[in-house]
Image: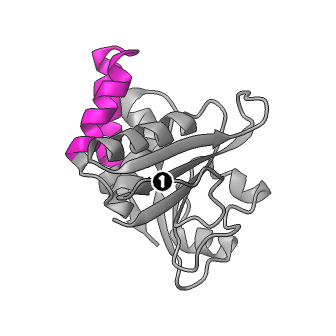
Amino acid sequence: MGKVEIRWHGRGGQGTVTAAKVFADACLSDGGYVQAFPEYGPERAGAPLRVCNRISSKELRMHCPVTHPDVVVVVDPTLIETIDVTEGAKDDAKFIINSSKDPSELREKLKLKSTQKLYVVDATKIAIESFGKPMPNSPIVGALNRVTGLVSLETLLEDVKKSFGKKFSQKIIDGNLLAVKRGYEEVKEG
């Protein structure tokens, strides 16, 4: 596996921090070393935030922000208008964007290099259809899992079940599991 660095861009209240932690926990369950840490000022709903993951087959000794990500996850597509989400991304970085827009339009807007890959999933729509709330975190986790292949889908679903099981009804848990699976299946390369 080597080391994979992921930088997430979202807004407070969208479940971005939870998504990064769930993904890290799943990678930990699969035997990797992980870090998941948010970077934000006063946390409030709607405020932009970043979350970083480091996942490695070896012990992680770095404890600094991810400045040259291998993967960039954009949970809130409106951030593309206000923040340079491509900042510091490696030449072969993978971008996963929650959007209903055409991938070619997003590729152009982000000014991605031909060596950088773009993946798009309409995570908000999937969330509304799966459990009735515009919380894109579960479908985005599914898409990230598909794009990176860092953990098996079964392990990821088990970890989602564990982390949501303490706080939510079976109906919400089932809806989130469906949303993860759909994010995994419906992510498109652009």
Q: What residue sits 57% from the left and 55% below the top? A: 62
Residue 172 x/y as whole percent: 35, 22
Magenta segment range? 154-183
Left or right of 156: which side holds 121? Answer: right
Residue 155 x/y as whole percent: 24, 42
Quadrant of the drawing holding the N terminus: bottom left
- The number of discs equals 1
Instruction: Indicate whether 161 appears above or below 32.
Output: above
Residue 55 x/y as whole percent: 43, 54
Instruction: Indicate whether 186 appears above or below 75.
Output: below
Q: What residue sits 70% from the left and 58% below the top? A: 80
Instruction: Indicate whether 167 appears above or below 12.
Output: above
Seen as rendered, the residue at the extreme bottom is 114
Seen as rendered, the residue at the extreme left is 154
Q: Main secondary structure of the magenta part?
A: helix
**Near-viewer residue (177 or 36):** 36
**Near-viewer residue (190 or 101):** 190
Instruction: Indicate whether 57 appears above or below 128.
Output: below
**Near-viewer residue (129 or 144):** 144
Q: Secondary structure at mark 1?
A: loop
Q: What residue sits 66% from the left and 53% below the top? A: 65
Q: Mark 1: give few (<14), some (14-19) or many (20+) Cα within 10 Å.
A: some
Residue 135 x/y as whole percent: 51, 34
Left or right of 176: which side holds 92? Answer: right
Say which residue label 1 marks.
Answer: 60
Q: Is residue 159 magenta?
A: yes
**Looking at the image, what colour scheme do you see?**
one colour
Q: Quadrant of residue 91?
A: bottom right
Give the residue type at disc 1: Leu
Q: Is residue 153 magenta?
A: no
